[in-house]
Image (spheres, grey):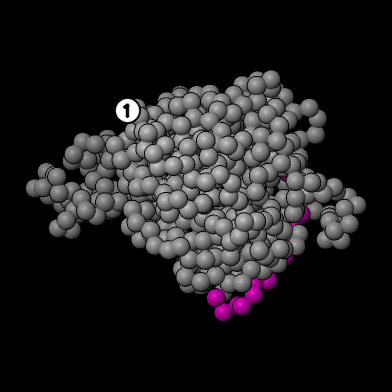
Amino acid sequence: MKRIPMVIYVAVFSLSTWAQGSEIQKEPDQGIVLERPGDPPAPASVVEALTEDKKAAQIIRNGHLSVQVNVTDNGLNTRDDAANEPSISVDPTAPNRMVIGWRQFDSIRSNHREAGVAWSNDGGRTWTNPGSLADGIFRSDPVLECDADGHFFYNSLSIFSSDLVQAEFFDSSDGGRTWAGPEEAFGGDKVWVTIDRTDGIGRGNIYQSWSTAANRWGDRVFSRSTDGGRTFSDPQVLLPPPIWGTLAVGRQGELYLAGNAGFVYNVFILWRSLDVKDPDVDEPSFQFFFANLGGRQGTGGGSFETPNPVGLLGQVWLAADTSDGPDSGALYMLSSVDPPGSDPQDVHFIRSTDGGETWSAPLRVNTDDRDAWQWFGTMSVAPNGRIDVVWIESLTAAEPSIGEIYYSFSSDGGFTWSDAVAVTPAFDSHVGFPQQNKMGDYFHMRSDLVGADLAYAATFNGEQDVFFLRIGDRDCDGNGVGDTEDLSAGDLEDCDGNEIPDLCEVAARPDSDVNGNGWLDVCEPPPRQGAGRSG
């Protein structure tokens, strides 16, 4: 990998500059369809007629296997529905247990959407879809999280009135099979969520931030729960608000929020709180710092000459390096942006080593310098500090909707990046619009010591569907060694020959070991007493 020099960018904007608009221009809404009800739900007779005798798609590109998630009980595809805007969460106590949520449109003839959900206990090899969380109820903008103890949370927008939305939380203690709730949680359009998994006083705290659009709270765009999601604090003002962004928890339980500075698309903002972790602090204190990503965050603006006409072209991703490595404590920000010049969209990355006060110069992650679209840039950071990034890359500038998903990683804090590799075949993002001309607003990825789990939407079936892609080998016991290597070396056992280590099957499926002796029931009596059951 070629080492690219980086220089420090110092934020020079002030709040008064932001308010006056003397240095930057606040732009109008670029055609985003607000999350509000439109069409009624598709009739049951129409929905029931859509199931087809077609097995869920499995897509392979360069050795990377994608598995369809939005399937029926029999593993079949549903014709003429749509699924997009997926969010994935993985149980840290049993990484083979994971849940994906998405916006479910039962028929493309209606823009009515619900809270789609599916769970897996075999590392994403297969998925079970029990149906929407609340059948017939309008829901949108799913964001999933899991706390340090394996408890899953599903944040979903619901309707407060015809013009206003709010967030609600569901929770699951059985790996996504059943859900309790919902509990009201303030919130609004384009909400995002994170949970403190540290061992400090903030462990288990839930934090959420949202856009100023179409919600009841105006400039109050932040709230937290210190009791496991049972109640949430009154929303708090952050001005300028961080719009269309994400949140991250640092090593000491400090909280960071990033986004564009309140629809000022070419200026980005980082909010930091050091005391938000303390449940005894009634109203946490925040500081903000500006950042430069070298371009504008934007949307399709309603144009079919863009890959996502009325959706985002990429949200602002923020991550903290919580490893013990040389970049411990660093912050990373990434988004697809429109840079100066004729190039419509690139994936840009910046880093901060002082808690967001100053940032490096923007670096382009995609190496292809064509005037093409690199959109839906998505980032996650592994516990060892490796930075994983994916994006959709259009094949030609003339056909922005035809693209493949590419993957690149950095092992040195973002100074250098691996050669990008295509991990999916090409698909058309303009196919299968469900009376709403977009493929959602985001993908979602979670990284571990060996690889990454990606939830994304694509149109391989000629319609919008949600897929799961494992990038790299699996590491279901979290030892930093791929399962394939552990099995071949005899360090883990696979008594039933399904290529899943027995330890991980028992951890993700307690029902597979009824007597609790650590052995899969299908393999008793154990083939080798005492082997492979101590980890």
Residue 220 location, quadrant: bottom right
Q: Residue at x 48, y 26 (%)?
A: 462
Question: Circle 1 sits in a helix, a strand or a loop, which is it?
Answer: strand
Q: Residue at x 65, y 41 (%)?
A: 312
Depth order, front residue of 46/417: 46
> Quarter holding the N terminus?
top right
Q: How many marks?
A: 1
Q: Is residue 352 magenta?
A: no
* Highlighted magenta segment, given as a residue range: 279-293
Q: Residue at x 48, y 61 (%)?
A: 169
Q: Camera-side residue: 440 or 387? A: 440
Residue 135 in sight: yes
Q: Main secondary structure of the magenta part?
A: loop
Identify the residue shown where x is 51% and y is 71%: 231
Task: Determine whether 113 is above or below 230 in the image.
Answer: above
Asked if residue 251 lies left or right of residue 343, the reply is left
Q: Position of residue 22 (x, y in %)?
A: 91, 52
Residue 369 place in picture, x, y as percent: 70, 25
The amino acid sitting under disc 1 is Asp
Q: Position of residue 366 (x, y in %)?
A: 64, 31
Residue furthest to the left in view is 525
Camera-side residue of 417 and 309: 309
The residue pinned by badge 1 equals 53
From what the image shows, is residue 491 above or below residue 330? Answer: above
Q: Does residue 470 appear in the picture of this structure?
A: no
